[in-house]
Image: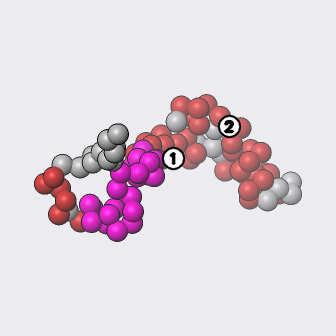
């Protein structure tokens, strides 16, 4: 029965690059962790571009009022800002 070898996703000429050496020393070559890391970094950049202007549109007065009413910073974010950001979060 033949033994299956892992498929190399990198062309032979790229083995000298710094990125390749960095991934090799970290143990990220031909792993699902490398794919997840690449997809997450790509998606995170898109999410920041989309969500930053939306977060800036939330009125500061709402956050200040919740802090005066006794909410902490995280509680104000969870109870005030996140419900207002429901639609933009669904987009991303």
Residue located beneath label 1 in the image: 52
Mark 1 or 2 closer to N-term?
A: 1
Query: Along the horizontal axis of the image, is 59 left or right of 15?
Result: right
- Residue at 63% of width from left, 43% of height from top? 58
Tell me whether circle 1 and circle 2 mark residues in contact (CB < 8 Å): no
Magenta stretch in the rendered image: 19-40
**Residue at the extreme left:** 13
- On the rendered image, what quadrant is the N terminus found in? top left
Query: Along the horizontal axis of the image, is 92 left or right of 16?
Result: right
**Residue at the extreme bottom:** 25
Q: Residues within 10 Å of mark 1 (few under 14, many from 20)?
A: few
Q: Residues within 10 Å of mark 2 (few under 14, many from 20)?
A: some
The secondary element bearing badge 1 is classed as helix
- Residue at 77% of width from left, 45% of height from top? 79
Residue 53 is a magenta residue: no
Nearer to us in this view, 21 or 74: 21
Residue 42 appears in which quarter of the rendering? top left
Nearer to us in this view, 65 or 9: 9
Q: Position of residue 44 (x, y in %)?
A: 47, 47
Checking the image for residue 84, the label placed there is: 2
Colouring convention used in this rendered image of the protein: secondary structure
Residue 29 versus residue 82 in the image, above or below:
below
The secondary element bearing badge 2 is classed as helix
């Amino acid at each position: 029965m033949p033994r299956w070898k892992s498929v190399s996703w990198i062309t032979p000429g790229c083995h000298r690059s710094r990125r390749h050496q960095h991934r090799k020393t970290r143990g990220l070559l031909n792993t699902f962790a490398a794919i997840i890391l690449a997809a997450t970094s790509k998606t995170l950049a898109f999410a920041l571009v989309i969500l930053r202007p939306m977060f800036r549109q939330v009125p500061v007065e709402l956050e200040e009022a919740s802090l005066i009413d006794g909410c902490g910073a995280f509680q104000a974010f969870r109870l005030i800002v996140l419900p207002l950001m429901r639609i933009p979060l669904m987009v991303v």
